[in-house]
Amino acid sequence: MTQAKISSGTMPMIGGLRGLPISIDDAERDFGYEIYDRMLNEPYLAAAVALIKIATLSEPISVEPAVPMPDEPLDGSDITQSDEWREYATACEVASVMRANIDQLGRGTSQLRMFLFDMLESITHGHRVAEVTEHKITGGTFAGRQFFKSIRPIPRNYYRLVTDVFNNLIGVMSYQPGKAATFMTGLIPNEITEWATFTDIEKLFVLSFRTRNGSPLGTSVLRPAYAPWWEKQNLRRGEISRIGQFGGEQFVIIAPEEGGQVHNWATKYGNSEDGTIASEERVLMDAMAEAATNMASGTAAVFPHGTLVQMLGSVSGADLFESKEGRVNREMAMTVLVTARTIMESNRNSQADAGAANDLFDMVKSFTADWLAEAVQEQLIRPSVRRNYGDEMAEQYTPVVTLAKANQADISKVAQGLARLADSGMITKPMLPHVWRDMLGIRYIPGEPVKATVDRAQAEGGPGNRPEPDEDEETG
């Protein structure tokens, strides 16, 4: 149970390291690794991807203590003298340092938000790699701490992922200034980890989307959208061609029946360059075709007396193209957002249909936000805690990262409802510490009136708010 035995990578019967290819699937192998960049030039796909990125990062990035706030002792003793409070105080101190670590990255959480927006490209490209660098703070409150210096996303053609036989990512081969780099695919020598162009996983932040068989290459949400995207490219070419051919006014030309007029035209225009005389009918057809071409191009056209010109209007076939284009747009949107209703009008346009679409999109958004927050917590925050406090502290006190916010309107309703229940006696005094902590997320103060607690709950931001101990309190 303590050691993996079943291989996951290529050539599973042979041990050693593997260099993974730059392409993540058959579409990139057949059409180049830039295929998904080209697909994102399609407005519907670009809108769907941008929407899921913006929705995921629209909530505040929260770094909270790993240890929950302890309950107030029922015997009325001072909670700050308990072991539980000291653990909570330590967790708050670690969380405070990690918040400061993020805040000093340019513009703080806004800078982290833009970095994560870039890293969410892994949704469309399978994975995204960033290099993390740190520096030691030399002065101030956090002197001696190792803080982030930069977190830089790396272009995919500048590196290759390296895994072991079990598909565990151990690092990357990469271009580096002043050093020659050789990218190898398949079995590679174990000594590559000692090469100057190898970068260990500890220095990287790697975001792999929807992995398959444990491969860090990930998969692209755009792969199922390739067929409708290809259809739309061909639809556009056909539509432009049809507009050029039939988009203008269509007309029918009926030749005059008076023989004299036809004979005069034949005499005037019928002599060819070699001196032969063409038939009157052929001359008439050629001359009228030339006149019709001039008329279609917007210039003047002259016909013999008696010619009948009937305008038919334009024949574009727009309904056919719009129907087909609507179908492929819907298919492309569904590959990213699960439901096309999020960015497209419904055929039924019902409130129930809209509500179901919103529920599905909320599920997609929640899944993406949880996945991203866990990656930040485990690949950025936990290693930083380990380097600043040691392995044991990192195991116990790594802060919890979330992408969520409290609903202030709901907080007010919950707080007022709890106040009425407490005043009526349905919530007894021993229940209060649990109610305030679990429902409002604040510390219960013995003897504080219910209304004062409610007001404090609304002022402090409601659920998710954990008051930190004063700086002069013991932090363990």
Image (cartoon, rainbow, N blue to C red):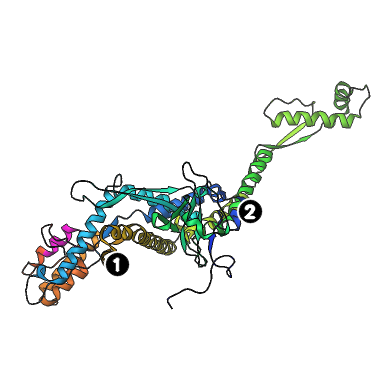
Q: Nearer the viewer, residue 278 or 67?
A: 67
- Rendered location of residue 51, percent (x, y): 42, 52
Give amino acid for label 1: Glu
Residue tagged by mark 2? 30
- Rendered location of residue 395, percent (x, y): 29, 67
Who's the residue at 22% across and 63% down the image? 91
Badge 1 element:
helix
Asked if residue 141 is positioned above or below residue 374 in the image, the reply reads above
The region drawn magenta spans 453-468
The label on residue 395 is 1
- Rendered location of residue 195, percent (x, y): 48, 52
Who's the residue at 64% across and 44% down the image? 237
Farthest right residue? 276
Give amino acid for label 2: Asp
Q: Nearer the viewer, residue 228 or 466?
A: 466
**CB atoms of marks 2 and 1 within 8 Å:** no
Q: Nearer the viewer, residue 54 or 197?
A: 197
The label on residue 201 is none
- Rendered location of residue 240, percent (x, y): 63, 42
Confirm whether the magenta stretch covers residue 43. no
Asked if residue 148 is positioned above or below residue 294 in the image, the reply reads below
The crowd level at tag 2 (other Cα within 10 Å; few <14, some 14-19, many 20+) is few
Q: Nearer the viewer, residue 474 or 235?
A: 474
Number of the front mark, 2 or 1: 1
Q: Is residue 177 left or right of residue 397?
A: right
Is the C terminus in the top left, top right, bottom left or bottom right quadrant?
bottom left
**What number of labels is visible?**
2
Q: Earlier in the sequence, mark 2 or mark 1?
A: 2
Distance between the alpha carbons at the discs numbered 2 and 1: 45 Å
Who's the residue at 18% across and 68% down the image? 87
